[in-house]
Image (cartoon, grey):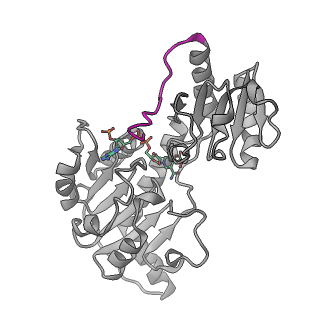
Amino acid sequence: MALLFISEQNRVDSWRDYLEKEIPDLDLRTLPDYGNKEDIDYALVWQPPSGLLKSLPNLKVIFSLGAGIDHLASDPELPDNIPVVRMVDPSLTSGMTEYVVMNVLNHHKGMRLYRDQQTRKEWSPHIPPVTWDRRVGIMGMGVLGSDVAGKLSYLGFDVAGWSRTHRERPGIKTFAGADQLDDFLRETEILVCLLPLTDETFDILNKDLFAKLPKGASVINAARGGHLVEEDLIAGLDNGHLSEATLDVFKSEPLDNDHPFWSHPKVTITPHAASFTHPSSSVRLIAEGIRRSESGEELLNVVDMKRGY
Ligand code: NDP
Ligand code: OXD
């Protein structure tokens, strides 16, 4: 059975051994010379060339190498009759939780101020509120947001979550839908975005939303650059309404050399590195997906492409 793997070239090398060990009869194909189109049964992909998947006549399942599928949904040529399975993997989840918890703690403790002060050899302590008086608001309470919320709550933070449909979580204040967005934002001091990128969530982090946060709030965007109106964030930071931002994702990646974020004193940048799909754990999910497909069982983590996530 043939699986076409599409990602950055260096990632194939790290995936090959794991895939071949987990799926012994696997015939692994890569670009550019992947052989006959008719051979390909499965595709495991990140940002495949537009139209390529549609040209594979015997394709059974498209596996996304990431949790997000906007890299597929944005392809107008994506075949609409092939299920898309997204990555729901413990290593991806724990990596994201580490990233968000690390940055929430940095914002909470004022680490950016201390970095600045160090350059001036300035000794000025800042006393943060106790964690239970610090509201962290998480936009997107799915696989990643729920895990992050649980761990932050364990650390004692006052955690709120916002999702599309109402979801009860022990110890978390939950809000849902456009009607409850303002209530969610009103007390959020550290805002974390873990939404999928859809038509509804594109540009959601904009000046109107920032204006509803309390003065001094900070922003962590670990979801997609498409969520953020970049100039609105810069305006909010420059006029003092927002205190700082940590950004992992950008409208255009890699970030342009002359982008103002690089040198903005209140912005911390990571290069779309909040979390990664590690082959050591995620190949089991691909193998299970292929097994289910071959035996006619229901696939897990199939994306609702109409809903967009
Ligand atoms: P899930 O699909 O599990 O969760 C999505 C959450 O967003 C759900 O709670 C959903 O609500 C909510 N949501 C969707 N649309 C809306 C809306 N219009 N209004 C309010 N809430 C909405 O996704 P994951 O948690 O697995 O991943 C989230 C995103 O994180 C991915 O799509 C990807 O873009 C990004 N990501 C970034 C990485 C990085 O390295 N920077 C790594 C991995 C993922 P409901 O619960 O009601 O369905
Ligand atoms: C993902 C990502 O969606 O890495 O998994 O961005």
Residue 178 lies, in percent from the top left, at: 22, 50
Residue 80 lies, in percent from the top left, at: 52, 32
Frontmost residue, 10 versus 32: 32
Instruction: Tell me which secondary structure the magenta stretch mostly adopts.
Output: loop
* Residue at horizontal 36 percent and vertical 72 percent from the top: 232
Compared to residue 253, the image places residue 11 above or below, namely: above
Quarter holding the N terminus is top right
Left/right placement of residue 126 relative to residue 223 reads left
* Residue at horizontal 38 percent and vertical 50 percent from the top: 199
Snapshot quadrant of residue 38: top right
Asked if the magenta segment contains residue 64, the reply would be: no
Asked if the magenta segment contains residue 296, the reply would be: yes
Quarter holding the C terminus is top left
* Residue at horizontal 68 percent and vertical 35 percent from the top: 55
Residue 147 lies, in percent from the top left, at: 39, 41
Range of magenta residues:
295-309
Snapshot quadrant of residue 44: top right
* Residue at horizontal 65 percent and vertical 26 percent from the top: 59
Residue furthest to the bottom in view is 120
Left/right placement of residue 308 relative to residue 283 reads left
Compared to residue 55, the image places residue 185 above or below, namely: below
